[in-house]
Image (cartoon, coloured by chain):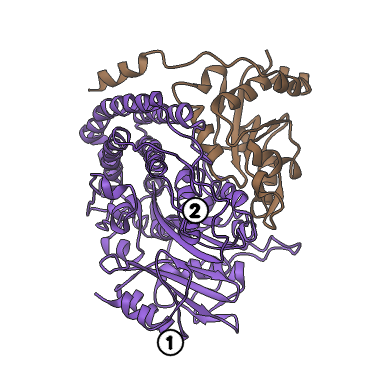
Chain colours: A brown, B purple
Amino acid sequence: MLKTLLQGLRRPLTEAPPTPDPALAALAANLDATARKRLGHSLSIRQVDAGSCNGCELEIHALNNAFHDLERFGLRFVASPRHADVLLVTGPVTKNMKEALERTWRATPDPKWVVAVGDCGADAGVFAGSYAVVGGVSAVIPVDLVIRGCPPSPEQLLRGLLSLLGS
Amino acid sequence: MSALSDLLAAGARVGGHYPWPCVAVTADVWRQATACLAEGAVTLLSLWGDTGRVHMALLSAEEAPPIAVLSLDCPSLRYPSVGASHPPAIRLERAIRDLFGLEAEGALDVRPWLDHGRWGEETPPPYRFLPVQGEALHQIPVGPVHAGIIEPGHFRFTAEGETVVRLEERLGYVHKGVDALLAGAQIGRAERIVARVSGDSTVAYSLGFARAVEAALDIAVPERAVWLRAVMAEMERLANHFGDFGAICNDASFSIMLAHCAVLRERVLRAAMACFGHRLMMDRIVPGGVTRDLDEAGVGMLLTLVESLGEAFAPLAELYDKTASLQDRTVTTGILKPALAAQFGAGGYVGRASGRGFDARRSVGYAPYDQLNFTVPVREDGDVNARAWIRIEEIRESLKLLEQLLTRLPDGPVLASLENAFPGPGEGMALVEAFRGDLLVWLRIVDGHVDRCHLRDASWFQWPLLEVVIEGNIVADFPLCNKSFNCSYSGHDL
C-alpha cells in the first residue's frame, strides 16, 4: 500500500517555474540590492492574515502542493516572524488586527520585505471604507511588493515571490 | 411535535417574508420560545439584530414548515436574553450588542465579542478572560497570529502539565464590518461582498445569498442554473474535504496524506478554473442564476475528473483505515458528545460525527437535491476519527452527486434577468449546506437594494464546542481537534 502511494507521487507533477511578470520584475528591481545579496537565493516567509476572507490563504497553501513545490526555489514558510525575511500579508487590515500586524512586523529582523497579497491586501478591496477596516497593508506597515488578485492564483504568487529573489 | 407551530400561532404573521413564515411576537412569546430551545423542542438556527428589533430563526425538522422566524420589537433597546437559558445564543447576543446596541436582559456574559474597543480612537480596554482556579495550573496564550498559514484568533489554554483543563477562545480579529457594508448596498455590490465573507465557502455563500434574494423578490431561476449551482457546490465541498482530510493527517505528522490530498484538491481547483473561470468559483452564482455556462467539453472534463478522483482517493481512505499509528492519534481524541451537538445544532461533519444527521440539502431540502440520490453519513463516536470519516464518506457522496448532476444536466438558459423583478420591499431567507455545515442567509430588500442582510456561518455553533472537546486532551492534540473542526474565522467574525 505505502509503496504504491509513494510511487504515485514520483510521477512528475511539479511544473516548470512561471515566466517572470515584467511589472513585478520592475517593482522588485527597486528593492535594495545589497539586502538581496545578503540573503542570497533563499527566503523564509512568514504569512500573516490581517483580515482576509481566507481565500488568499487557500492559494498560498497551494504553493506547497506537488504542482507548485515552493521549496525547490529556496522559499519556505516559517512559524515565527523572528525567523522570517519576508512577511506575506493578506487581508484588508482590520482595526482588530492592526496592532498584531505591527507587532509581527517589529518582531521580524532586518533586512525584511513585506509583500501585500490580494486585492484586499492592496487597497482593502470590497471592504474599503468600512468602520472596522484600516485599509490595505501599506496603510499600516511599509510594503515592498503587491501581488493583486482575488485571490491571486498560485502562479501569480510564485511569480511575485520569485521576482523578489531576482534572476 | 408542534412546538414551532404553537409559537407561530402565538404571533402576528409578518407579510412578504419567504419562503418560511415570520411572526411578530411579544416578549412573553419570545420567552416561551427560549424555553422551547432550552428543552430541546426546537433548534436555534440564528439570532440577529436589526434596527430596534431582534429576530430568531428556529428549526424543527419534523414539522411543516420546518423553519420559522420570530421578531421582537425592542423600543427600549432591550430584549429577554436567550443565552441565559440556552448557551448557544450567548455569543450571538454579545455580537448583537456590539453591532446593534441591543441589550440581552438577564445575560450571563456581557463582555463584548466582536468589538475589541478598536473601532474608535480610544485605547482598548483589557479583555477579561474567565477565571480558572486550581493547583499547578499554567496558561498558554496562542495567537492572534498563529504559526501556520491560518486565520487569526486567540486561544487561551489553561493546562495542568500536558492536559488542557480549559480553553477559552477570543475571536473577532478579522471583523470587517460586513453587516454595515451590506446595509444599503445595491444587489450587485452586495453579492461581491457576500462572496468574500469566507473564501473557502464562497460558492455556498453566493448560493445562500442568491436563494434568499430570489425568495424575497420571487425570481424564478432557470433549471439548468439550479443544477450548475449544485455542480459548483459539490466541487467546493470536494476541494475542502480533500484539503481538510490531508491536513488532519498532517497534524498527526502523516504528511504523505497531505501531499496526496493536496494534489486531488489542486485537480478540482484546476477543473473549476477551466470550466467556470475561477479556481474557487467566486462570483459565479448570482441572484437569477449563474454567470458561466458549462459546455459539452466541460461536462466531459468534469466526468473524467470525477472518475479519476474516485480512483485516486480509494487507496488513500484505505491507507487511513489501515495505519494504526495514525488512528492512535485520532481515535478517542476530542470527543463531542451527541447531546451537546444536538443542543448547539452543530452542523456539518461536526454534528454528523456526533449523531446529529442534519444536512440542509436533505433535512430542509432544496433543488436539485430532491431529485438526486445521496446518503448523509452519520456517526456516533464524535472524535477526530469520526469527523475524518464523515469527510471520507462525504467525498464519496459528492463524487456520486457530481456524476448524477453532470449526466442529467438539463438544457436551457442559465441566468434570469433581474431588470423587471419586483424591487421589494421583501424579506427572504435561505439555508444551504456549505462544506462545514448549514449556512443561513436572511435579508430584506428595499427598492432593489439590500436593506439588511444577516449571514450565519456554521462556525458560530461549532467554535464553542471546540472549547469543550479539547478538555482533558493533551495540548499537542489541539491542532488535530482544531483541524477536524476547521471553523471559519472570517465567516464568524464578519
Q: Is residue B354 left or right of residue A115?
A: left
Locate residue B106, reporting x and y percent. 49, 82
Identify residue for label 2. Answer: B209
Please say whether residue B131 is visible from this viewpoint.
Answer: no
Disc 1 is placed on an element classified as helix
Check disc 2 and give the amino acid type: Phe
Circle 2 residues within 10 Å: few <14, some 14–19, many ≥20: many
Please say whether residue A109 is visible from this viewpoint.
Answer: yes
In the rendered view, tell whether residue B42 sits above or below residue B323: below
Seen at 60% across and 84% down, the residue is B76
Circle 1 residues within 10 Å: few <14, some 14–19, many ≥20: few
| Figure quadrant of residue B133 | bottom left
- Which chain is disc 1 placed on? B
Locate residue B241, reporting x and y percent. 36, 39
Relative depth, front residue between B65 and A13: B65
Locate residue B161, reporting x and y percent. 40, 53
Check disc 1 and give the amino acid type: Asp
Q: Is residue B238 left or right of residue B285?
A: left
Disc 2 is placed on an element classified as helix
Image quadrant holding the N terminus of chain B, namely bottom left
Q: Mark 2 or mark 1, which is nearer to you?
A: 2
Point out which mark residue B28 bears.
1
- Which chain is disc 2 placed on? B
Point out which mark residue B338 bears.
none
Locate residue B200, reporting x and y percent. 47, 42
Q: Which numbered disc, 2 or 1, marks the residue that appears first in the sequence?
A: 1
